[in-house]
Amino acid sequence: MITIKNKLSIQKMQQAGQLLADLFDQLLIKIVPGITTLEIDSWIEDFLRTNNLVSQSKGYKGYSHASCISVNDEVVHGIPCNNKIIKDGDLVKIDICASWKGYCADAARCYFIGQPKEETKQLVNVAQRALDKGIEKALPGNRLSDISAAIQAEIEKSGYGIVRDFAGHGIGKFMHEDPEILNYGKPGHGPILRPGMTFAIEPMITQGKCDVYITNDGWTVKTKDKSLAAHVEDTIVITNEGVQILTRKNIEA
């Protein structure tokens, strides 16, 4: 069942989203060659605590960190650790879900370390465009799969792989709510979108084949062919006027 959020719930999600947007901006100068992913996570946890945000990943099914930090061929759910040192040329994906006064926002961003290769920038640009195309379809009266189809079309026309084992989701009082939002599908299917629905939309794409596997740590998802992967995510709310992106500054309508 898709929960319709009231005005107060959405305001809390908006506050969580704006704080996350600020956090991600500040990370731009924090992630430098030589830093470990555990040091990045520690800084994130301090930021969340200072701003009265509660991490939704820490403690989730035994996960012990405030963020997921995935590097290069890691797609999602990379575990921060002391022996993973960021190097020049790396592509780093950071995924954070946190709540403010009981309501959540979820977002992921890609970070280039040093001067990225042109093909790396292209991969991330396509992931971002796919996210934007999906968000554009999150309009009252559309169907849920209109979002999925728009994401798929943008990715496939650029020749990249779509990770199909993981998907976006509803969000609100809980990190994961109904519905599941696939990154592929035909338009015109699924529930009709209504004002007050809140979703976390998150394309995950690869430079090579789309096949992935979970490593022995039980969390980290990597590409089987070791190709680079990109992951971006925003939390949105459907309104009578259109869609608002809660996890970007200067909320768009």
Image (cartoon, rainbow, N blue to C red):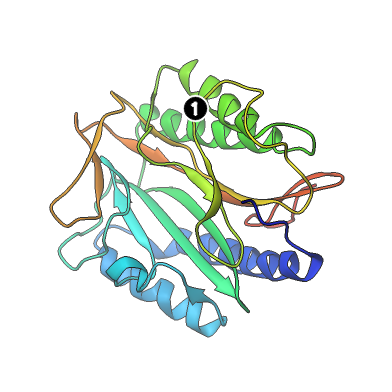
Quickly name the residue at label 1. Answer: 184
Of 157 and 191, the residue lying toward us: 191
Question: Furthest-right residue in view?
Answer: 241
Instruction: Report if residue 233 is visible in the image.
Output: no
In the rendered image, the vertical position of residue 161 relative to residue 91, given as above or below: above
Q: Residue at x 69, y 64 (%)?
A: 14
Residue 198: x %, y % from top left = 66, 53
Q: Is residue 90 left or right of residue 244?
A: left
Kind of residue sitting beneath label 1: Tyr
- Mark 1 closeness class: few <14, some 14–19, many ≥20 residues within 10 Å: many
Question: Furthest-front residue in view?
Answer: 1
In the rendered image, the vertical position of residue 160 relative to residue 73, given as above or below: above
Asked where in the image residue 186 lies, by quadrant, the reply is top right
Residue 106: x %, y % from top left = 53, 58
Q: Residue at x 26, y 61 (%)?
A: 79
Asked where in the image residue 5 lies, by quadrant, the reply is bottom right
Instruction: Report if residue 176 is visible in the image.
Output: yes
Residue 157: x %, y % from top left = 50, 15
In the rendered image, the vertical position of residue 191 relative to residue 157, given as above or below: below
Residue 97: x %, y % from top left = 49, 63
Q: Residue at x 37, y 33 (%)?
A: 163
Q: Secondary structure at mark 1?
A: loop
Q: Is residue 5 left or right of residue 129?
A: right
Q: Is residue 215 left or right of residue 38?
A: left
In the rendered image, the vertical position of residue 96 relative to residue 126, given as above or below: below
